[in-house]
Amino acid sequence: MNQQIAAAHTSLHHFSVPLSATRRGARLARLLAAERLDAWGVPLDPARLVVAELAANAVLHGKVPGRSFRLGLSLLAPRVLRVEVTDARGDRLPVPERAMAVAQPAESGYGLLLVEELADRWGVREGPFPCKTVWAEFDLAGSPGRLPPAPGNT
């Protein structure tokens, strides 16, 4: 698991929304992310798949009765997409999937392995108490789409 927090970037676009910590909220996170990525001219996949997994994890492992989770999307310069999902269970940090897969083969529980394979970087940021944020970043430099030019380029 890549636990390094990426260097500061300049934000070109930012989207953030609280969602109910339910299956419906996780589905809405995926749909809203797809709409926002399309509006920004960013390829939907693999980011949409990662949003779906992180939102499902927030509902399954990060749910606290009466508390929502937050989806955040940022398009950063130079051409990086950052996905963040914040939930209210900072006491339950993700376990590296590769270690779990070797120790206990199972039919489920491979979601963060998918995130690790699809994202260029990912990690977990603790806080503010009692929350945690699981984030993933995608380098878009070689991606097709209608991305705005990087600052300094015309």
Image: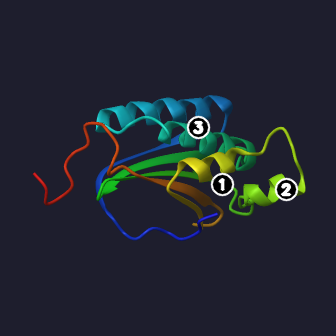
Residue at 45 percent of width and 36 percent of height: 33
Q: Looking at the image, do the residues carrying marks 3 and 1 touch, with CB atoms under 8 Å apart?
A: no
Residue 126 visible in image: no
Q: Cα distance, mark 1 to mark 2? A: 29 Å
Neighbour tally class for label 1: few under 14, some 14-19, many 20 plus, Cα within 10 Å: many
Q: Does dot 1 land on a helix, a strand or a loop?
A: loop
Q: Give the numbered dot on residue 32.
A: none
Q: Cα distance, mark 3 to mark 2? A: 24 Å
Residue at 44 percent of width and 32 percent of height: 34
Query: Tag 1: residue type?
Result: Ala
Which mark sits nearer the N-terminus, 3 or 2? 3
Q: Give the numbered dot on residue 52.
A: 3
Which mark sits nearer the N-terminus, 1 or 2? 1
Q: Looking at the image, do the residues carrying marks 1 and 2 touch, with CB atoms under 8 Å apart?
A: no
The residue tagged 1 is 88
Q: Along the horizontal axis of the image, is 130 left or right of 13?
A: right
Query: At which x and y percent is residue 123?
Result: 58, 62
